[in-house]
Image (tube, helix red, strand yellow):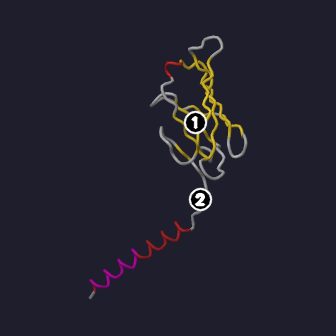
Amino acid sequence: MLRNVKFLFVILAVLVIAGSAYAFAAANTVEASAAGYTATTVSGYDVTAVVYNLNATDPTLVDTINFTVSPSSGASVAKLVKIQTADAGAWTECVTTPGTAPAATVVCTITGAPLAGVTALNVVVSSSLDPA
């Protein structure tokens, strides 16, 4: 009989913990946002009108990369854009300027980067700012 009471107590404790965890999770609210990253099409943002601006003195160097980002669906304006110009390379934070809503013009300054070293253009876009 004592064994059954202990077993019943353990089951009751598990149910209380599971119920409180569910109640806590159900109380969370997350605002709508968008993000996207990959070399193929992903939901989130469209990147168009990519322009590589070469250095005026030495055209083998890239000074900036400009492009436009706009949400694939909805109206989540891009607030954070980073690029990577070589696979496994460093990420560069870019400056976004509002364009025709909800699109934004993006300027990524990579002054003096060798054109031969620009072997990829990986773009990360988010509708929320980086917390770090």
Please, is residue 86 above or below residue 101 in the view? above
Q: Does 16 lie within the magenta span?
A: no
Please provide percent x and percent y for residue 32: 61, 56
Please provide percent x and percent y for residue 3: 26, 83
In the rendered image, the quadrant that contains the C terminus is top right
Task: Give the magenta part as a residue range.
Answer: 3-14
List the single residue furthest toward the top.
57
Please provide percent x and percent y for residue 30: 59, 59
Please, is residue 100 above or below residue 29 in the view? above
Which mark is first along the chain, 2 or 1? 2
Q: Which residue is mark 2?
A: 30
Secondary structure beneath label 2 = loop
Q: Is residue 38 left or right of residue 13?
A: right
Is the magenta region chiefly helix, strand or loop?
A: helix
Q: Is residue 41 left or right of residue 64?
A: left
Residue 82's mark? Answer: 1
Q: Within 10 angstroms of label 1, few (less than 14), some, or many (20 or more) residues?
A: some
What amino acid type is highlighted by mark number 1? Lys
Q: Is residue 100 left or right of residue 37?
A: right
Q: Residue at 62%, 57% (x, y): give it.
A: 31
